[in-house]
Image (cartoon, rainbow, N blue to C red):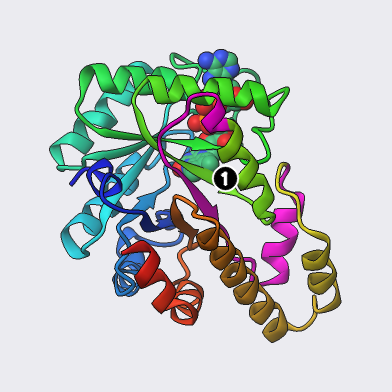
Amino acid sequence: MRISNIISRKKTFSFEVFPPNPNNSSIQDIFPTIDALGQYAPDFISVTFKSSGDYAQNTIDLASYIKRNTSAEPLAHLTCGALDKDDVEQVADTMRQEGLENVLALRGDKPAEYTGDYLKYFKHASELMDFLRSNYDFCLAGACYPEGHIESESLYDDLVNLKIKQDMGASFFVTQLFYDNNYYYRLVRVAKKMGITVPIIPGIMPLTSTTMFNKIMNMAGASIPFEMRVLFDRFRNDKKAMYEIGIAYSVNQILELLANDADGIHIYTMNNAKVTGDIYNRISSVIEKELR
Ligand code: FAD
């Protein structure tokens, strides 16, 4: 089913997963996690794509597994920056053959192993969307950035470009992670003013360990609220406390977003069904009421 059909009826509850590292695991290793995540009845599960285009088949295989074995619709990511037009065509053809109907069309970042300019045929995600809508019949989604994309001079410029993605066929957007909901509210407010009418689904990344916290701190573009930082600093050597704080923070973030009429909830699961379940179980009645 096209996710746009679900979105036309109701707000969505959804997850992101990634194919396991092919150097030390096989795609089957993630299947029990997908089965466990399926228990929470997400409307869709998105599957990441490596920006170099290597292992594209793993994204497709995982999305196909989701389609066959859960009640969720798969949303396959496809990044275009480092790919030739032929490579994009090959991936899109295979997605179509597999019956995948939903694509999150992205530009992608420069692959770690590349030096110099990496952009090949498509320079922006909107060009990929234009190409896909002209040659295929996918339901298209795009990415957006509550604190602005790191390469953008301003949030305004970023939103001008977001509007182009809508014009090129995006039926909805999923946001980059954020920890201060005010960035999401601002994004939605300004986007609406600029004529963006499709849903903007907030992406929530639970931070449940010191390793994850440090990773996010080093990642440009996501501010950590003062209170969260204080708690994570104070309890950085206490695994149990870090976990409890992370779950509680995500739960509060989701509740506040729902109270403010957010366009759904998308959880970056990091392939961790326990974390996702611990969040879901604490607010399952609210999720059932607001997002079913
Ligand atoms: P674009 O929409 O092309 O935007 C990139 C930059 O170019 C922005 O600054 C934008 O303002 C600017 N821009 C856009 N269009 C124009 C234009 N027409 N003219 C001038 N400037 C323009 N990465 C992966 O490698 N794999 C994944 O699976 C993946 N999944 C993601 C999922 C989500 C929900 C999000 C938020 C990000 C994801 N990313 C993923 C990261 C993403 O690829 C990077 O953030 C990348 O730098 C930008 O991708 P984009 O599709 O947003 O690009």
Which residue is at a point 44% across and 13% down the rendered structure image?
A: 121
Respond yes or no on whether mark 1 lies under 8 Å from ligand 1: yes
Residue 204 inside the magenta-drawn segment: yes
Residue 279 spot, x, y in % from top left = 50, 75
Q: Which residues are magenta?
A: 191-220
Q: Please name the amino acid that badge 1 sits on.
A: Gln
User: Does residue 70 sit above or below 80 in this rendering?
Assistant: below
User: Does residue 94 sit above or below 177 in this rendering?
Assistant: above
Residue 67 spot, x, y in % from top left = 20, 55
Left or right: where does residue 234 sit relative to residue 151? right
Q: Residues within 10 Å of mark 1 (few under 14, many from 20)?
A: many
Residue 201 spot, x, y in % from top left = 46, 48
Q: Secondary structure at mark 1?
A: strand
Can you tell which quarter of the image residue 35 is in? bottom left
Q: Nearer the viewer, residue 6 or 52?
A: 6
Residue 88 spot, x, y in % from top left = 33, 25
Can you tell which quarter of the image residue 151 is in? top right
Q: Is residue 189 visible?
A: yes
Give the residue pinned by disc 1: 176
Which residue is at a point 81% across and 67% down the rendered structure image?
A: 227
Residue 146 inside the magenta-drawn segment: no
Which residue is at a point 37% across and 42% down the rendered structure image?
A: 55
- Indicate the quadrant of ligand 1 in the picture: top right
Which residue is at a point 33% across and 59% down the rendered structure image?
A: 27
Q: Is residue 113 visible?
A: no
Left or right: where does residue 21 sit relative to residue 62? right
Q: Work out which quarter of the rendered image holds the C terminus and state it.
A: bottom left
Can you tell which quarter of the image residue 31 is in? bottom left
The outermost residue toward the top is: 121
